[in-house]
Amino acid sequence: MCAVLAIALAPRAAADPTDDAFIAALQRHGIPVADPSRAIGIAHTLCSDLDSGQSRTSLVLPLARAANLTAHEAAYFLGAAVASYCPD
């Protein structure tokens, strides 16, 4: 996974209800997102990575490092991505 999540204090509204709910879930967990489009793209990439056989565990630590998140925050991001965008 090569995506990087931009973290900052000024989030923008996303384009549709699913996107809005995903961004709101991150914010409720204390993960403010500067670029919702990028966060949503990362979420879709995570779903593709899972579909290609990567484990959740293998995705959490690279996401945490790339986005300067704790492992707990990265795991939450992944869980929110799965709940919002991964069909299975």
Image: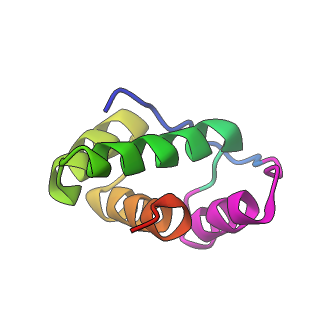
Residue depicted at x 17% and y 57%? 57
- How many labels sit on residues? 0
- Does residue 35 appear anywhere in the picture? no
Residue 73 vs residue 33: left or right? left
Q: Position of residue 30 (x, y in %)?
A: 56, 65
On screen, 4 above or below 77?
Answer: above
In magenta segment, residue 18? yes
Which secondary structure class fits the magenta region best? helix
Residue depicted at x 63% and y 54%? 32
Residue closer to the observer: 67 or 77: 77
Residue 13 vs residue 85: left or right? right
Residue depicted at x 50% and y 38%? 5
Residue closer to the observer: 70 or 20: 20
Q: Quadrant of the C terminus?
A: bottom left
Residue depicted at x 69% and y 68%? 21
Q: Position of residue 56 (x, y in %)?
A: 23, 58
Q: Quadrant of the N terminus?
A: top left
On screen, 32 above or below 68?
Answer: below
Q: Position of residue 27 (x, y in %)?
A: 63, 64
Q: Magenta segment range?
A: 12-31
Determine which quarter of the picture holds residue 70.
Answer: bottom left
Q: Position of residue 11 (x, y in %)?
A: 75, 49
- Does residue 88 appear anywhere in the picture? yes
In magenta segment, residue 46? no
Residue closer to the observer: 73 or 48: 48
Determine which quarter of the picture holds residue 84.
Answer: bottom right
Colouring used for the render: rainbow
On screen, 88 above or below 74?
Answer: below
